Image (cartoon, rainbow, N blue to C red):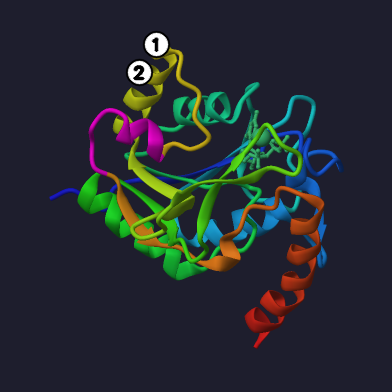
Amino acid sequence: MSGPAKTAALIPAAGLGTRLGQGPKAFLDLNGLTLLARSVTALAPHVDEVVVALPQGYALPENIRARAITGGATRQASVLALLRVTDAEVVLIHDAARPFLPPEVIAGVRRAAAETGAATAALSVADTLVRGQSQASPPLWGELTLREGLWAVQTPQGFRRELLLAAHLEAERDGIQATDDAGLVARLGLPVALVPGDARLFKVTTPGDLILARALAHLWDAEDAS
Ligand code: CTP
Ligand code: MG
C-alpha cells in the first residue's frame, strides 16, 4: 500500500509585470496581502510543499512560508526550473497573478489530475468571440468564432510531474513557447481535463484588472473572516 502521492504547489511569480507597469505583480498589495501571499496561503493547506519562482534579485518576504528559487526569462522557463527542484509525484502549477483561488477549484483540479494525468481550471466562454481585423485602427469585426464549446483556460493546472516535465522537454526541443502548461501536454496528444474554474480567478494583467482585484479583495477577505 502506498500513501497519498506527494503533491507540490509550484507558483511562477518571476514575471516583471510589464503590462501593468508597477514592477513584479507578485509583490503588489491587495488589501494588506500581496498577490503572492494570497496564492501561497490558498494552496498550502492542500499540498506537501509550496515552491515559488521569483525574479532575479528578489527574496521571499519572511511571512511567506514557502521555498523560493530564481525563475527564468519566460513563464515556461520558470515552470521548468520549478519542476526540477521538487520530487513530488503530483504538481499543481498556479500563476501568482491569479490571487483569488477558491478551495473547491484546487480540490477539483487535484482530483481530475489524479484521474486523467493532467487537468486545468477553465471557464466556459460567455461572450461572443470575434477576431479583430488588425490592419485598421480601431480594428474591424473580422471572423466570428462560435462560443459553443469554448473555454478560457485558467490556473491552477495539475499534472503528474513526470508527464509535465516530459512535455516541457519536448517543447524545448521543438522550440515551442506557450503561455500555459496544459497546452504543452495537449500538444503531445494526451488528454487534459477541463475543471470548472471561477470568474474570480482572473489574471491581474492590466491596470484595470488591478482596480478590480483591489475592489474584490475587500469582499473576499470579509467572506473569509465571516
Ligand atoms: N512568470 C514567471 N516568469 C516569467 C514570466 C512570467 O514566473 N519569466 C509568471 C508571472 O509572475 C505570473 C505568471 O507567470 O505569475 C503569468 O504571467 P503574466 O501574467 O504574463 O505576468 P508578467 O510576465 O509578470 O506580466 P507581463 O507579461 O505584463 O510582463
Ligand atoms: Mg508575461
Please rate how many residues cluster around mark 1, counting C-alpha atoms within 10 Å: few if below 14, some from 14 to 19, many from 20: few
Q: Give the residue type at disc 2.
A: Glu
Callout 1 touching callout 2 (CB < 8 Å): yes
- The answer to whether the beta carbon of the residue marked 1 is less than 8 Å from any atom of ligand 1 is no
**Residue at 12% over, 50% down:** 1
Looking at this view, is 59 or 91 the one in front?
91
Residue 159 falls in which quadrant of the image?
top left
Dot 2: element: helix
**Residue at 70% over, 76% down:** 221
Dot 1: element: helix
**Residue at 38% over, 31% down:** 184
Name the residue furthest bottom.
226
**Residue 13 image offset from top left, x and y in percent:** 66, 39
**Residue 182 image offset from top left, x and y in percent:** 39, 40
- The answer to whether the beta carbon of the residue marked 2 is less than 8 Å from any atom of ligand 1 is no
**Residue 97 image offset from top left, x and y in percent:** 66, 49
Q: Is residue 7 above or below residue 189?
A: below
In this rendering, position of residue 13 left or right of residue 83 = right
**What distance separates the C-alpha of mark 1 from that of mark 2?**
5 Å
Q: Disc 1 designates what residue?
A: 173
| First to last magenta residue range | 182-191
